[in-house]
Image (spheres, rainbow, N blue to C red):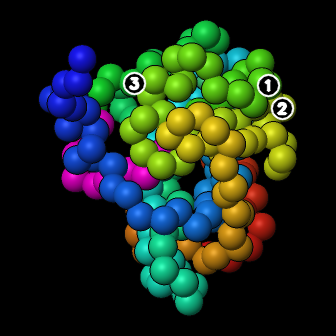
Amino acid sequence: MAQGPTATMGLFDALFRSSEILGIAEETLEFALEASEDAHPNEYMAFLRASEAGDLGLDRDGQVITDVLVIPGTSSNPVSATVRTNMIPNDRTAVGSVHSHPNGVLRPSAEDLSTFTRGDVHIILGAPYGRTDWKAFDEEGQPRELDVLDVELPAGEDFFHFDQSDLDAAVGWDRGEEW
Ligand SMILES: [Zn+2]
C-alpha cells in the first residue's frame, strides 16, 4: 500500500537539508569521541550540523560537519539513548547524527536503522573511542566514506553546545592548536 510521507517524516525532512557532505572537521570528530568517552558506559547521542566548505576556506562545493549539537532532554542509559523529539531545535538544520556504542560494535542496530532515514550521515563511535574507533553510514545503514578534514573552525561562533557534563569533560581537554 503506497502512502505519502507521514506528518512526522515531513517534520524531519524540514529539519534536515541535503547537500553533499565532504567530511567532518577533525576537531569536531575529536570532540564527539571525547564526549562519548565521558558518557561511557552510557550512550552518547547528538545531531550534526555542517558549514559550507567555502566558509572554511576550502575551494570546494559542499558541506563539512563542524558542529555537534547535544539535545537538551536526551536521556541515556547503557542500552540506548533516546531523544525527546520535541526538544530538537528548529532554528538550524542538521545533516545527520552521531552516537556511541559502549559495547564497541561499529554496526547500526535495527533501532539505529529506523532513525538513520533522517539525515545523510550517521556516525557510530565505539569504545574505547580512539581516533579510528568510528564508522560513518548513509541513510540506509550502508558504510560510507567520510573524510576527516583539518579545517580551521570559524572563531567567535558558538560552535559546540555543551551541557554540564560536557563542560566538565572539556576541562583539561587539550585542543592542541589555536583555533
Ligand atoms: Zn546504535
Question: What's the magenta region?
Answer: 88-96
Say whether disc 1 or disc 3 marks the residue closer to the N-terminus. Answer: 3
| Gap between marks 2 and 3 measured at Cα | 23 Å
Nearer to us in this view, 129 or 9: 9
Say if the magenta span includes residue 89. Answer: yes
The location of residue 178, given as percent across then percent down, is 68, 76
Residue at 46 percent of width and 23 percent of height: 114
Q: Element under label 1?
A: loop
Identity, as a three-letter code, of the amino acid under mark 1: Gly
Identify the residue shown where x is 29% and y is 27%.
85
- Crowd class of label 3 (few under 14; some 14 to 19; many from 20; radius 10 Å): some
Residue 104, quarter of picture: top right
In the picture, measured across the screen, residue 138 lies left or right of residue 120, that is: right
Q: Which of marks 2 and 1 is in front?
A: 1
On residue 120, which mark appears?
Answer: none
Q: Please give the name of the residue rendered at 81% of the width and 40% of the height, measured from the top-left corner.
A: 133
Magenta region's main secondary structure?
loop
Q: Where is residue 18 in the image (x, y as percent from the top left)?
A: 38, 58
Mark number displayed over residue 104: 1
Can you identify the residue that label 3 sits on?
Answer: 83
* Contact, mark 2 vs mark 1 (Cβ under 8 Å): yes
Q: In this view, does 94 lie above or below 115?
A: below
40 relative to 57, above or below: above
Image coords of residue 160 (percent x, y): 48, 54
Q: What element carries label 3?
A: loop
The mark that comes first in sequence, 2 or 3, is: 3
| Image quadrant in which the C terminus is located | bottom right
**Residue found at x 64% / y 12%:** 78
Q: What residue did someone put label 2 on?
A: 128
